[in-house]
Image (spheres, rainbow, N blue to C red):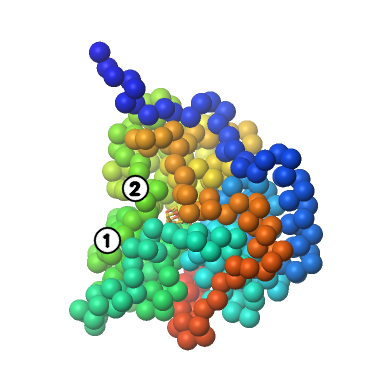
Amino acid sequence: MIDTTEIPPIAPAGFRVERRTPPDQLDRLSREILRLNEELNAVILAHNYQVPEIQDLADYVGDSLGLSRQAADTDSDVIVFCGVHFMAETAKILSPQKTVLLPDRDAGCSLEESCPPDKLRELQETNPNFYTIAYVNCSAEVKALSDVICTSGNAKKIVEAAPPDRDLLFVPDENLGSWVTEQTGRPMTYWQGNCYVHVEWTHDSISRIRREYPIAPLVAHPECTKAVRILADEVCSTEKMVHYCQAVESDAIIIATEVGMLHRLQKECPDKQFIPAPTEKCACNECHLMKMNTLEKLHDCMAKRTPEVTLSPEIIERARLPIERMLEISAR
Ligand code: 13P
Ligand code: SF4
C-alpha cells in the first residue's frame, strides 16, 4: 500500500494568495498610508512577492529591474521600498539624495548572505582577468566590487555584452549563472550561492503537479535548479512571467516562484487560473524575508520615517557605476 501521508498536498482549485492584515484594520491602515504618501511626497515601490495588501496600494509593483528603473527616475522625495534590503540599497545608490525607507530592516536575502565582500575580494585576487557580473541580489559592498550588475530580467543581455577576452565570474547565484550559460554558451566561474526558496522545488515535486495538470504550461524562475528548469515551458524573471501568462493561450498555468507572484498574475490575468508549484513539503512556497514587510510596518515606517537605508558616499559612488552600466546595456 502507498503511504499517502508522505505526499505533500497540492493547492486547491481557485487558489488565492491570502491577505495577512486583519479585515478590521485593512481599510484604516490603507487610507492612512495613502495620506502619508501624499504628505511625504513619497512613492511606494513593491516587489511582486509582497503581500497582496501592499501590492494593492503601491504606486508601482514589479521585478528587480523595473523597481531599479523606477527608483532611478522618480521625482518623489521619499522612496518607500517594499521588498528586501538589497533592493532598497539599490534604490539608495541610484537616488542618493532621496530618503529610502524599508518597512523591516531585517528583510534580507539568502543570496546576499552567501557572498561576503571579503570572500569575493579573495576570489577576485586569484585571477586578474576576472570580469565580475553580480546578480542584483547582493550587498552594496559586493556591487562596489563588481564590473556590472544584472537582474534575472536582463542577465542574458548583460553576459552577451561582457568583454569577450575576459574570464567571467558570476556571483552570487549559481543557478541563475548556469541558466545564463545555457542561453549564451559563455562559460563562467559561479559563486556557490543559491536562493533558499527556489531550490526547494525538485524534479519530483514539479513532475507531480505536471501530471495533475498535464496541459497547463509551467513557468519557472531562473533561480530554480536545472532539474526543475528543464521541465519548464518558460524560464524568466517575475515581470516577464506577467507577459508570458498574458500571451499564452492556456487558461491554467503552473507557477514555480514565490507565492506572492500569484496575486500579481491574478490581477493582470483575472480570467486565468494560476496553480502554485508544490515543493516536497508544501503546496506552495514563500520567502519569509519578503514577507517580513506587513501593512502595519509599512504604515509605521512612513509615519516615523524609519528604518531608513543609508550607505557611505564611497560605496554609493563605487556601486553606482556597475548598476548604471547595467541600465545602459539593458536599454539598448
Ligand atoms: P525578479 O527580479 O525576477 O523579480 O527576482 C527577484 C528575486 O528575488 C527572485 O527571488
Ligand atoms: Fe532572496 Fe530568494 Fe527571497 Fe528572492 S526569494 S529575496 S532570492 S531569498
Q: Is 40 rendered above or below residue 104?
A: below
Amino acid type at image mark 2: Val
Image point 53% across, 46% down: which residue? 261
* Rendered location of residue 131, percent (x, y): 31, 76
Q: What distance separates the C-alpha of mark 2 from that of mark 1?
A: 13 Å
Q: How many marks?
A: 2
Image point 52% across, 31% down: which residue? 252
Label located before the other in sequence (2 or 1)? 1
Which picture quadrant has residue 78? Answer: bottom right
User: What residue is pinned by disc 2?
Assistant: 199
Q: Nearer the viewer, residue 148 or 311?
A: 311
Res. 192 mark? 1
* Rendered location of residue 145, percent (x, y): 37, 79
Q: Nearer the viewer, residue 312 or 207?
A: 312
Question: At numbered mark 2, what does the secondary structure look like: helix, strand or loop?
Answer: helix
Q: Quadrant of the N terminus?
A: top left
Horizontal side of 88 relative to 161 (left or right) equals right
Amino acid type at image mark 1: Gln
* Rendered location of residue 311, percent (x, y): 52, 78
* Rendered location of residue 273, percent (x, y): 55, 32
